[in-house]
Image: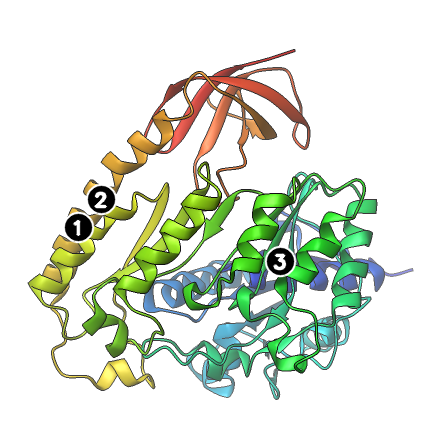
Amino acid sequence: MGRVPAVAIVSLGCPKNQVDAEIMAGLLAAGGYRLVDDQSHADAIIVNTCGFIDPAKEESIQAILAAAQQKQGRCRAVLIAGCLGQRYGEELLVELPEADAIVGTGRFPEICELVARALEGQRFTAVGDPQPPGTEGLPRRIAGHGATAYLKIADGCDNRCAYCKIPDIRGPFRSRPLAAVVKEAERLVAAGVRELVVVAQDTTRYGEDLGSAAPRLPDLVRALAALPDLRWIRLMYLYPTRITDDLIEVVANEKKVCKYFDIPLQHISDRMLAAMNRRGDRAAIYRLVERIRTRIPDASFRSAFIVGFPGETAADFKQLLAALADLAFDNVGVFTYSREEGTPAAERPGQISERVKSQRFDRLMARQQEIALARRARWIGREIDVLIEGRDDEGLAVGRGEMDAPEVDGAVHVASSARPGEFIRARVERAEPYDLYGSEIK
């Protein structure tokens, strides 16, 4: 009997990509392959890439080259999956002779067959339609401690922001049927998942493409909240103009829904929002945040902003800097504009120098750090639930509260013997800009 081939998967980029990687892992395990974390023990390595902006592409290329180094040892095939493969296809095989196969975003359900072909020595491209014909009911292997899982409710995007290629890479927005999403959630909860992080390119658009009578995001959240063993539901990627009063009410009323709003705004200047082809304006953003805080005073907020977009003036940036103080978000991600080929913004006049972009990035982050510390300090003396995820360098249990999303936000450090995947109750005693420290309440 021959040796069972071992496969390692490296997943980069966003949580939507992570879901695809976990489905590939589930399919490979069900198909008789052995999954390994150590690339030096793998016969085939799959690099599930991100192709969103230049730094992400560079990270993907470096991961591919690192995987190719393993071909000096046991590894016989390197497969490039995900957005980079979908975006560049055959071109990647020419530019990266180290790679053996390109797997597009719509072909990952065929991963067992594609790995087999690559291990046989074939060199090929499998791209085609950017969205898979169907992933319902496919096995999935959750990464990490298993208590948190991403729940992808749609794929693709129709927003056509001026800086973004995702609609071309991932295709048009397409919601999954509510029954299928709930069924997957039931399977995940039955397997031990206690936190579902709901994701899509535009989560708030859920159901709009299915017809006027189709369920929308509030309906889906209510259905998920009815699952008995689920502890937290977290909503990510909420487009500001699509956050309805109904959705705010669901977050306010459903105990399982984290009082957490992830609203990537990208800018606050009306000029910049229009140039970016973003809907809404500065006044509408301020009104939205006020509506949420009026209904849910303890709500936590996350947003993302781009500095150095073509044509951004000092006055535009000054508005953005002022908005940080006005809106006082708990967590903010800042990105310097990346000139992506094939996007309308790449051809706009008024491109900003890298030096100015970097200066604006530093100023915005320094200001946000002050705000983040003030927002963290509001938890001192209060009791919170914490989902433990590991231990820090000091030996403290480290996890997250309701105010923090996995991978992108801060952490809570607690003197506790709890193991990853367990919830504990803790009293907050100290705050830093991104982290909280406290003691477990037995």
The residue nearer to you, when weighing 25 against 364, is 364
Residue at 62 percent of width and 44 percent of height: 253
Mark in front: 1 vs 3: 1
Is residue 305 visible to us here?
Answer: yes
Residue 322's disc number: 1
Residue contact at pointers 1 and 2, CB within 8 angstroms: yes
Location of mark 2 (residue)? 325
Q: CA distance from mark 1 to mark 3?
A: 43 Å
Q: Earlier in the sequence, mark 1 or mark 3?
A: 3
Name the quarter where the C terminus is drawn.
top right
Bin the neighbour count of mark 2 within 10 Å (Cα to Cα): few under 14, some 14-19, many 20 and up.
few
Residue at the top extreme, as displayed: 442
Residue 9's disc number: 3
The residue nearer to you, when weighing 276 against 52, is 276
Residue contact at pointers 3 and 2, CB within 8 angstroms: no
Bin the neighbour count of mark 3 within 10 Å (Cα to Cα): few under 14, some 14-19, many 20 and up.
many
Q: Earlier in the sequence, mark 3 or mark 2?
A: 3
Give percent across and percent down for residue 238: 48, 61
Q: Secondary structure at mark 3?
A: strand
Image: 181 above or below 413: below
